[in-house]
Image (cartoon, rainbow, N blue to C red):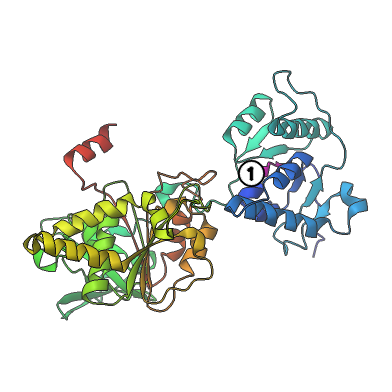
Amino acid sequence: MAARKPRRKDDTKLFVLDTNVLMHDPTSLFRFQEHDLFLPMMTLEELDNNKKGMSEVARNARQASRFMEELVAGREHSLHEGVPLDGPSKGQAVGRLFLQTEAITSVLPSQLPMGKADNQILGVVHHLQQMQPKRHVILVSKDINMRIKARTMGLAAEDYFNDKVLEDTDLLYTGMREIDQAFWEKNGKDLQSWQEGGRSYWRIKGPDVIDLYPNQLLYQQGETPFIARVAEIDGKSALIVSLKDYSHQKNAIWGILARNREQNFALNLLMDPEIDFISLLGQAGTGKTLLTLAASLAQTLETKIYSEIIMTRVTVPVGEDIGFLPGTEEEKMQPWMGALEDNLDVLNQTDAEAGDWGRAATRDLIRSRIKVKSLNFMRGRTFLNKFLIIDEAQNLTPKQMKTLITRAGPGTKVVCLGNVSQIDTPYLTEGSSGLTYVVDRFKGWNHSGHITLQRGERSRLADYAAETL
């Protein structure tokens, strides 16, 4: 067997890390494979400035510093040769980490004041490019303006892509698939069909089964539209079951009816006790919160499957203190919970026969069963037999999403609601949002379901505004 050719220095790139990359993902130190990393002194200085506090950014800054101390401990006299990353990363990264061990004075355009941290980092990139002209030196930053400045100076700059679940959110799993007659012809050679408990069942075998996911919505357009759910997948066969029709008045949930195919499927998922995790994506006005609240109230107050409803949402800025104003946790969360109040008003109007007294009593009953919680106090908790609703989930990082979902104890259902085109958290994008992350990771699990709601159902004004503005 031929010996492996040693790496030529010119073949590998030298990535200069901006502080925001480490504060976004401390493990980024180990994610550049065979390439080398360089950390300017200004990056370490900014990490030091951002280490205080309980925010996600501060936690990440502290974690990045801990990683670096483990790497450089005992190597004080050989830092100029670089610290090998092979061992600490368990083989994921085979490059070296270089720290700035000497003063670098680089000549930048006179318009760029050298006192600014960003410009000092740009000066380091410029210096390294001059010192190693044959090597590809690239600045990695989550800051768009920093990348633009670098490019205007003729320096290579890139965003940090390693945290992205998907490069293009158009590829995100929608939870549904359109089928046609050809699908049945290809996969229906040994078709078995039967009826049981008011539902129709079909067992199919064929080449398309491997592309199906558990709890995926299948629909067929035509004179008699077909709509069903993949109940289970067993090797090369799949069991398909018809849906309960929640658009019919007799199946109304807390007075709410499904207005379109996706809403009908969402209610089927929400009302199924076998499904523990549900994610609903959609633009404003598609009914995510209303459907979820209606289903949660029906299962908490009528069928009593769950003991109470817990609703939480990200208070952007994420993870910061919710204030020293007088009041309980719930009272401090009230300003963020306008959507909850609006939807409860709609649900309260559905019982027309109850009268004002009846509605007031119902409102008080509902309020006693819905607890509004802040994300900041979720660590270490366990929820038993609760219906947990996470609103505005697109503003969560994958790590925060994991912290929340792992709170679920026996008998708890978790529902994530969000719209990935409305992200308010700094440095989070559609591709790296925690909501995108969970949709992608949960799609193959038998006890999870996802649907992207397509049509807005608010009003003709809201629909027209969404299209034209």
| Foreground pick, 444 / 222 | 444
Residue drawn 86% across the image and 42% down it? 101
Residue located beneath label 1 in the image: 20
| Foreground pick, 406 / 381 | 381
User: Please, is residue 368 above or below residue 234 in the view?
Assistant: above
User: Please, is residue 170 above or below residue 186 in the view?
Assistant: above
State which quarter of the image contains the C terminus.
top left
Is 440 included in the stretch rendered in magenta? no
Left or right: residue 261 versus residue 404 is left
Q: Position of residue 425 (x, y in %)?
A: 50, 46
Instruction: State how many labels appear.
Output: 1
Left or right: residue 334 versus residue 143 is left
Instruction: Residue at the far left: name it.
Output: 353
Q: Position of residue 382 (x, y in %)?
A: 47, 74
Residue 195 falls in which quadrant of the image?
bottom left
Q: Position of residue 445 (x, y in %)?
A: 41, 70
Mark 1: which secondary structure?
helix
The magenta segment: 13-20
